[in-house]
């Protein structure tokens, strides 16, 4: 039995000794970073809209877009973090650098919410349009703080889970079982951090002070970094292997470069340089990309020797890996809209809560803490699925559970129902607001919002699990980081689409000085119509997803026969594809 891990090194660069490096304890040291990342990001996101409206005096639609742009940027930057980790920095350095950036951002946010010079004068008018808005300098400091946090989130989100799994050897059955345990604990940590953010941290922000809440995030990240650094000598490190983005670009560039070349009738003439065990069988789909594997006269040097330039000639396996990624795109596209509905739960739904009766006895529930029902729905839905549904399904169908596509489908349907429920509740809330326009708190219980939080939250629990499993299991082995980044871009684009949709609806319904569906004051708008629009789009998207899922299953079911591909002796002038 080998005492070292073949593809990992220790902190000195020597082959990693199994007895001295890796395992559960080093993997667990990175979990503190993940808790603080969730605590910071969600602690800001779920309660930021109340700060923007109540303290910075921004209109309702503008406040919602600031939050969704912040969240969208956070997840979009995961691609940057993943690229740097794979190509240059490695996961350890990426975590250390971006955790420090996030700590700096939350610290600056604590300062900006503390100093009176960095916010407009207090205003207690019922209509925010009567208050003095934050000036460009005040908003500039706020944006700088927020996007430093977003940059930190992007780097951490792409690397922490991967660094944790790097501590286990997949070829060792014992360590492979420990890695499975790590994944379940990792999701638990994400949920714990989110739960702490929407309860304890939101309460501190509202009752003690914003600066205290954000300061705690910064201090917690510092402590987590100290703990993370303490394991430096015990970690296993994977060498940078190059970015899948470069590999995909090489295939596309090579295919376009040979667009006039004719595909051979015998595919065994296509170029392949990987050993038999590492190859991916050829498929007939997206045949244009096969041109990247056509051997032409330009692939030979002046002396007749075979020269491989990865930007002109790629092996069949690399081309097939790109094809696999393309097959994921319809599923990817039809899961984006869910995160747009999710965005409403931390923006307009929280703003709805600020106008409703939130007292239970002598305790007033912070508006941002209503998302605890959202987090609770995630945990409950997953617990019911794991403990009750899977055993029954296994007994009935003989299968270990639903497929990842089935989980996503159910999640999309629940989220569409959630938006429909939100529209109905908003009709009720607006009918009350019509007769109490001068009051800041409407005589209607905030618990009317629970169904929309619960339905969308249960949907997220299933969709997140299904998406993560789908993109990891269906992607090529060498593009796992890329596929995880692709999954995270659905979150990013969902938030950005929310901002775009709000802007379009505001422009279309609020022209000529009218309030419109979304605008200055949600009590005078038609948020019910906006929610109804999202519900309709969600049901249409659900139908498109079912079509895409059927297409994907049909295409992946058609397996091409094994084909021998020619292996040529070559001289590589660059790193291979």
Image: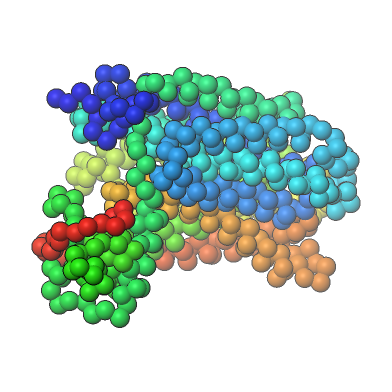
Percent across and percent down for residue 122 are: 87, 39
* Residue at point 57%, 51% (across, down): 72
* Residue at point 78%, 56% (across, down): 520
Left or right for 367, reference 471: right
User: For the image shown, how many numbered marks are present on the structure?
Assistant: 0
Question: Compared to 364, does 53 lie above or below?
Answer: below
Left or right for 395, reference 183: left
Q: Quadrant of residue 268?
A: bottom left
* Residue at point 13%, 53% (across, down): 276
Percent across and percent down for residue 216 are: 65, 25
Closer to the camera in the image, 425 or 402: 402
* Residue at point 34%, 36% (across, down): 238
Closer to the camera in the image, 113 or 243: 243
* Placement of the C terminus among the 4 image quadrants: bottom left
Left or right for 327, reference 108: left
Closer to the camera in the image, 334 or 212: 212
Left or right for 66, reference 130: left
Closer to the camera in the image, 210 or 286: 286
Percent across and percent down for residue 192 are: 50, 30
Percent across and percent down for residue 149 are: 61, 40
């Amino acid at each position: 039995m080998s005492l070292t891990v073949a593809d990992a090194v220790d902190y000195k660069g020597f082959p990693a000794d199994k007895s001295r490096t890796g395992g559960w304890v080093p993997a667990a040291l990175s979990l503190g970073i993940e808790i603080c990342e969730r605590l910071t990001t969600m602690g800001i996101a779920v309660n930021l809209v109340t700060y923007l409206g109540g303290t910075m005096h921004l209109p309702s639609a503008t406040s919602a877009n600031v939050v969704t742009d912040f969240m969208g940027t956070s997840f979009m930057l995961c691609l940057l973090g993943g690229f740097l980790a794979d190509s240059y920095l490695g996961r350890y350095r990426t975590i250390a650098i971006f955790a420090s950036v996030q700590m700096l951002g939350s610290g600056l946010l604590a300062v900006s919410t503390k100093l009176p010079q960095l916010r407009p004068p207090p205003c207690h008018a019922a209509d925010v349009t009567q208050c003095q808005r934050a000036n460009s300098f005040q908003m500039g400091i706020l944006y700088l703080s927020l996007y430093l946090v977003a940059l930190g989130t992007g780097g951490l989100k792409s690397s922490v889970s991967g660094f944790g799994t790097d501590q286990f050897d997949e070829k060792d059955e014992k360590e492979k079982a420990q890695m499975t345990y790590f994944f379940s604990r990792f999701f638990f940590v994400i949920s714990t951090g989110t739960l702490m953010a929407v309860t304890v941290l939101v309460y501190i922000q509202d009752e003690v002070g914003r600066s205290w809440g954000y300061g705690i995030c910064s201090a917690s990240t510092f402590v987590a970094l100290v703990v993370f650094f303490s394991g430096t000598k015990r970690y296993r490190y994977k060498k940078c292997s190059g970015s899948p983005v470069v590999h995909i670009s090489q295939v596309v560039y090579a295919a376009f470069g040979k667009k006039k070349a004719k595909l051979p009738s015998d595919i065994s003439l296509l170029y392949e340089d990987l050993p038999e065990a590492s190859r991916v069988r050829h498929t007939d789909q997206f045949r244009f990309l096969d041109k990247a594997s056509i051997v032409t006269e330009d692939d030979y040097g002046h002396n007749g020797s075979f020269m491989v330039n990865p930007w002109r000639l790629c092996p069949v396996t690399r081309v097939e890996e790109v094809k696999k990624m393309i097959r994921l795109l319809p599923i990817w596209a039809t899961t984006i809209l869910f995160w747009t509905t999710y965005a409403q739960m931390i923006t307009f739904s929280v703003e709805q809560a600020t106008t409703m009766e939130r007292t239970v006895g002598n305790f007033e529930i912070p508006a941002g803490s209503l998302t605890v029902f959202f987090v609770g729905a995630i945990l409950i839905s997953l617990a019911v699925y794991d403990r009750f549904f899977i055993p029954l399904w296994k007994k009935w169908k003989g299968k270990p559970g639903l497929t990842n596509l089935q989980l996503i489908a159910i999640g999309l349907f629940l989220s569409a129902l959630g938006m429909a429920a939100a529209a109905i509740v908003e009709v009720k809330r607006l009918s009350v607001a019509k007769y109490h326009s001068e009051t800041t708190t409407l005589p209607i219980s905030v618990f009317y919002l629970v169904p929309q939080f619960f339905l969308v939250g249960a949907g997220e629990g299933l969709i997140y699990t299904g998406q993560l499993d789908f993109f990891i299991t269906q992607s090529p082995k060498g593009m796992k980081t890329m596929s995880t980044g692709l999954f995270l871009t659905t979150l990013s684009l969902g938030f950005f689409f929310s901002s775009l949709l709000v802007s379009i609806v505001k422009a279309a319904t609020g022209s000529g000085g009218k309030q419109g569906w979304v605008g200055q004051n949600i009590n005078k708008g038609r948020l019910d119509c906006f929610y109804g629009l999202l519900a309709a789009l969600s049901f249409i998207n659900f139908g498109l997803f079912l079509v895409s899922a059927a297409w994907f299953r049909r295409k992946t079911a058609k397996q091409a026969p094994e084909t021998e591909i020619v292996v040529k002796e070559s001289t590589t002038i660059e790193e291979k594809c």
